[in-house]
Amino acid sequence: MDKIEHIGIAVKDLEASNKLFEKLLGVPHYKIEEVASEGVKTSFFKSGPNKIELLEATKPDSPIAKYLEKKGEGIHHIAFSVEDIVSEIERLKGEGFVVLNETPKKGADNKLVAFLHPKGTNGVLVELCQEIKEG
Ligand code: ZN
């Protein structure tokens, strides 16, 4: 695994949180993207070398809606960038981690992503993400 690619934060009201994080970080979000298959709308901020992803549920049965219901707003996941997501999934499975997406799926911000079950990672939802290369 490589550097932390971003930190995902679950929020109830993306518009209000965009304003809040703009005040906090001193920069506006640089993109908003909806991932319909996941029932989530995301916005992204860059702060120095760091990236923050805010996540708002777009339907009541989406994973983010369930998370907010159970735990409230807060840090939802930590994403690590990986060079080769398929071989990293194989490696982690070999180490006994439970991979929630054996086949990586298309996530926000031009990434292939896969998640590890938080039960195997001290309660932290870990996302692997690999930049989708054009061509
Ligand atoms: Zn993420």
Image (tube, helix red, strand yellow):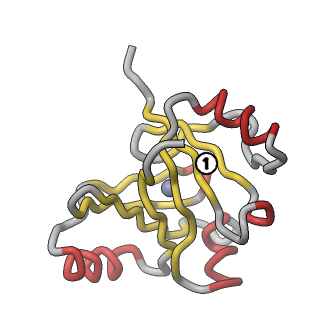
Say which residue appears at 71% left-offset and 71% top-offset: 123
Say which residue appears at 79% left-offset and 61% top-offset: 120
Say which residue appears at 24% left-offset and 81% top-offset: 24
Can you say whether 102 is above or below 10 in the image? above
* Amino acid at circle 1: Ser
Q: Position of residue 113 (x, y in %)?
A: 57, 42
Can you say whether 81 is above or below 11 in the image? above
Residue 38: image quadrant is bottom right
Residue projecting furthest to the top:
135
Q: Position of residue 105 (x, y in %)?
A: 61, 38
Q: Position of residue 18 (x, y in %)?
A: 30, 74
Residue 47: image quadrant is bottom left
Question: Which corner quadrant holds the N terminus?
Answer: top right
Secondary structure of the residue carrying tag 1 is helix
In the displayed structure, does residue 114 sit left or right of residue 13? Answer: right
Q: Position of residue 109 (x, y in %)?
A: 40, 45
Residue under circle 1? 37
